[in-house]
Image: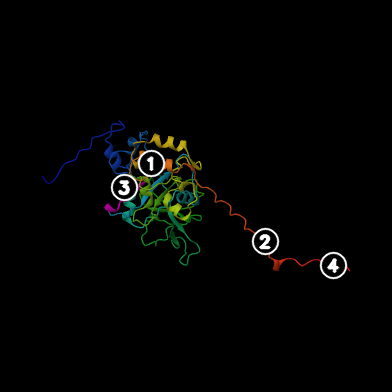
């Protein structure tokens, strides 16, 4: 035989819906790509939510990750605040440079609550091509605005609208609109895009963090290895200090034992020897590292002052006549 037929029927969370379809539809996350919802593997409740999604290179994508942060019911959020939060998560506001990227994003997030979120498009009034309403628009990534997808009649600069959002739940889906942050009808969410590859291996860092390939103990969306390469004194650089209290002790052993026997991706920070499993090898690493994480260097001894030689002796005081 030269072909086979696969059937998926598992329903690990007993919600009456086959898991595989929920993964494909974006309802549940499957960051390690084994077609089992991560919530089931972690033993956590499978709650419908907005998860990061990847536009995979194998699907003709750029390998970037995207997530809609929807704050519905929590009030509006300004564009600047949205960007600060996106950067704080290790990414930036999303920049949609083509129709293909837009369509992929909309398809990947179709099962999520999306609203009409901010994206990484703003109008630079100091730009040489600035004119109202359509001049001077820039992507936060620095990419050129070679492709645009403005909704009909947009941008219109109604009362100083210098920032852009994407229409999803209103207007033609995927089109752009210029907004001002103070509008009470304005966006109550934003889109994060992760594109960074700090270790230069050709794979977006954030996806490697989600899959457990790279450790991100401070959860800032940046691999610890990249941060420690530039500043080895960070708390996260003491890898055996699992509870980040400044020393490797019995409490770290207790934390390790709670995950004993698990695969690396479930608790990547605990796979201290990098063999893909949390086991006795990792316990041995902790025992070898027992004690304070970072010891202050010993103070250098004060230099010894050599005794004065005869030639350096002070002259006798003059005698009284």
Disc 4 + disc 1, Cβ < 8 Å: no
Q: Which residue is mark 2?
A: 307
Out of 179 and 62, give the one closest to the viewer: 62
* Label at residue 316: none
**Residue 35: x percent and y percent?**
27, 41
Residue count near mark 2 (Cα–Cα under 10 Å), binned few <14, some 14–19, many ≥20: few
- Please state which of residues 235 and 199 is positioned toward the viewer in this rendering: 235
Q: Which mark is residue 107?
A: 3
Q: Which residue is mark 1?
A: 282
Q: Earlier in the sequence, mark 4 or mark 1?
A: 1
Going by the image, does 55 lie left or right of 253? left
Asked if disc 2 and disc 3 are in contact, CB closer than 8 Å, the reply is no
Dot placed on the residue nearer the N-terminal end, 3 or 4? 3
* Sequence-first tag of 2 and 4: 2
- Give the residues in magenta: 52-59
Residue topped by disc 4: 319
Which class describes the residues within 10 Å of circle 3: few (<14), some (14-19), or many (20+)?
some
């Amino acid at each position: 035989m030269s072909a086979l037929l696969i059937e998926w029927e598992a329903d690990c969370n007993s919600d009456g819906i086959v898991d595989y379809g929920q993964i494909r539809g974006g309802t549940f996350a499957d960051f390690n790509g084994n077609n089992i919802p991560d919530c089931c593997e972690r033993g956590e409740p499978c709650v419908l939510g907005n998860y990061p999604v990847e536009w995979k290179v194998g699907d003709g994508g750029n390998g970037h990750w995207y997530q809609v942060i929807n704050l519905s019911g929590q009030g509006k959020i300004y564009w600047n605040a949205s960007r600060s939060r996106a950067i704080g998560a290790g990414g930036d506001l999303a920049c949609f440079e083509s129709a293909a990227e837009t369509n992929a994003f909309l398809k990947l997030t179709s099962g999520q609550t999306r609203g009409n979120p901010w994206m990484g498009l703003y109008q630079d009034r100091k730009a040489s091509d600035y004119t109202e309403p359509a001049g001077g628009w820039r992507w936060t990534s620095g990419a050129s605005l070679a492709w645009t997808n403005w909704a009909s009649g947009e941008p219109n600069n109604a009362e100083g609208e210098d920032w852009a959002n994407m229409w999803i739940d209103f207007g033609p889906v995927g089109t752009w609109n210029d907004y001002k942050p103070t509008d009470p009808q304005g966006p109550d969410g934003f889109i994060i895009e992760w594109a960074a590859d700090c270790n230069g291996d050709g794979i977006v860092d954030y996806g490697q963090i989600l899959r457990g390939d790279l450790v991100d103990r401070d959860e800032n969306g940046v691999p610890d290895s990249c941060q420690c390469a530039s500043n080895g004194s960070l708390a996260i650089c003491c890898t055996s200090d699992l509870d980040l209290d400044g020393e490797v002790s019995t409490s770290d052993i207790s934390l390790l034992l709670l995950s004993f026997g698990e695969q690396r991706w479930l608790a990547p920070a605990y796979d201290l020897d990098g063999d893909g499993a949390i086991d006795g090898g990792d316990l041995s690493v902790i025992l070898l590292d027992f004690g304070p994480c970072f010891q202050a260097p010993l103070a250098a001894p004060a230099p010894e002052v050599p005794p004065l030689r005869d030639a350096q002796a002070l002259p006798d005081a003059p005698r009284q006549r």
